[in-house]
Image (tube, helix red, strand yellow):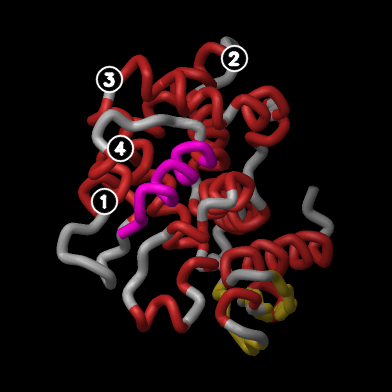
Amino acid sequence: MPNKTNVELVQKVIQYTFNDVDLLKQALTHRSANHKHNERLEFLGDAILGSVIATALYQKFPKANEGQLSRLRSFLVKEKALADLANELEFSQFVILGSGELKSGGFRRASILSDVFEAIIGAVILDSNYQKAEEYILTLYKSKLSSITLNMADKDPKTKLQEWLQARNYAIPNYEVVKEAGKDHAKTYWVNCKLDYQNISVEGSGNSRRNAEQDAACQTMKKLKVN
């Protein structure tokens, strides 16, 4: 567990001072390190985060429909967005991991960082109340919420391509990873997007399988001249 100095430093970094520092320690603890880990707090934080961001988007975009609001919320609370915020706050150095996860660079892994981010939110609400947790989340998200636009609610390339094909009664695409390279925390993936329609096969790449699939779908739409 972090010592007193580290706990004080963590609180400064995450911009919140705990009444019960044990909640903070638990939020930082991965299941590989201790039986008293952060998964329950992560569950709670995920629910609170989704609620606060949904309310903020509802108020910011009064003319947006349900689909647009859902896509914007997903954009703001997805794993990468949470990991990016965790990296901006630079608290990966305080994540408590078991020896195996530590050796494999788990403190850099987006899934672990996003889980810790949500667990800290869960710890904040247990340490205070919903209103303070809401204020805390909105402070962390101030920049992202101010810069987000309704244009960002546009459907992603995979969704657009699938809907275009289904509207014409064509089979949906098949995505297959054909290559991956690099270390776990810095991998590049290459994915083929294969269509029965016109026997098309197009390759895309990205720093995750999902991003590579999106890139492959985007390249496929260009080949099909789909807007």
* First of labels 4, 3 by sequence position: 4
Name the amino acid type tagged 3. Answer: Asn
Q: Pick the residue in front: 41 or 6.
A: 6
SS of the residue under disc 2: helix
Name the residue carrying label 3. Answer: 129
Residue 134 percent across, percent down from the top left: 41, 21
Q: Amino acid at mark 2?
A: Lys
Q: Earlier in the sequence, mark 4 or mark 1?
A: 1
Residue 115, percent across and down?
Answer: 39, 53
Picture layout, residue 9 above or below residue 166: above
| Closer-to-camera residue (65/69) | 69
Q: Are marks 3 and 2 in contact (CB under 8 Å)?
A: no
Amino acid type, label 4: Gly
Snapshot quadrant of residue 85 = top right
Q: CA distance from mark 4 to mark 3?
A: 10 Å
In the image, 212: left or right of 10?
right
Q: Is residue 163 visible in this depiction of the protein?
A: no
Look at the numbered disc 1 and give the secondary structure of its residue. helix
